[in-house]
Amino acid sequence: MRSSTLTATALVAVLGLTACTSEEPTPTPSTDEATSSGGTTTDDGLEGGPGTNGWMCQYASPDAVSAVAGEEPTTVRELVVQDDAEGWVCQVLVGGAGEQETVLTVSVLLGEEYRDAARARAESADGAEPGPAYLGVSFLSPGLVTGLTLCTAPDAARSDDRIPYTLVAESLAETGEDATDALRATLGEAARSLDQGLGCSPQAALAEDAATTTAP
């Protein structure tokens, strides 16, 4: 897997500066705010920290969290569980002290190994079907949405020097149609931010995949 000189902390900063939504402005916390909840326990005994204006790790809206939780949760926390040169992973937790459970995860991972593993998992999931083209080579299944795209490498000298970026949103609670739609919307937010901050080409990912699968 190709190494990168850009840490995921810097990636979060880029995404935070460019996050957007067609419905309402997405909050853009600083890098410190976006990652400070990782590995912390607050005064109320809950792991993680509150999202900015209710948004969890910038991309999961309050409506999305409610959809995957099956109801509007009274206590929601975000927790960044990976933040390194290989990627960034956010967990959304609900429940009181001693009863917290993860209901949603959002991942942005770099490199071919993550792409191949995510694709194998997505293709073998029950009810898997093709996802939207704006996520690149993408797959939808109940409670799991995967997008495999190509974005400019963080250390690239040219904008067309791209590497695989793997986007995954997964519900660990509800897996119905509403939950899956919420996961798709969450990845859409992440994909738009990646494109604006780094420059991505889902079309190139689709073309590369087509060339690979049709080669003799």
Image (cartoon, grey):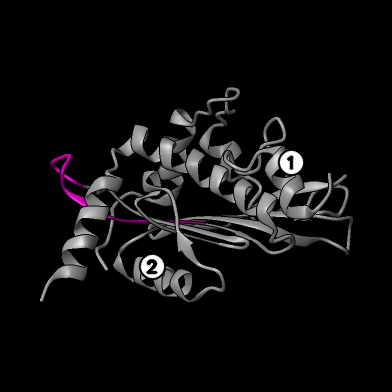
Mark yes or no: residue 48 visible: no
Residue at left offset 57%, top offset 45%: 35
Residue 172 sits inside the magenta stretch: no
In the rendered structure, which disc, 2 or 1, sits on the residue that comes first in sequence? 1
Q: In x, y percent, where is residue 82?
A: 53, 59
Q: Secondary structure at mark 1?
A: loop
Horizontal relation, residue 196 to residue 106: left or right: left
Residue designated by label 1: 50
The mark found on residue 61 in the picture is: none
Horizontal relation, residue 17 to residue 46: left or right: left
Amino acid at dot 1? Pro
Residue at left offset 26%, top offset 54%: 206
Count of labels in the image: 2
Residue designated by label 2: 114
Q: Which residues are magenta?
A: 156-168
Amino acid at dot 2? Tyr
Residue at left offset 74%, top offset 62%: 173
* Placement of 123 over or under 57, stated as above or below: below
Q: Secondary structure at mark 2?
A: helix
Residue at left offset 51%, top offset 47%: 187
Q: Are marks 2 and 1 in contact (CB under 8 Å)?
A: no
Could you tell me which quadrant the C terminus lies in? bottom left
Which numbered mark, 2 or 1, is in the foreground of this view? Answer: 2
Q: In x, y percent, where is residue 166?
A: 40, 58
Q: CA distance from mark 2 to mark 1?
A: 28 Å
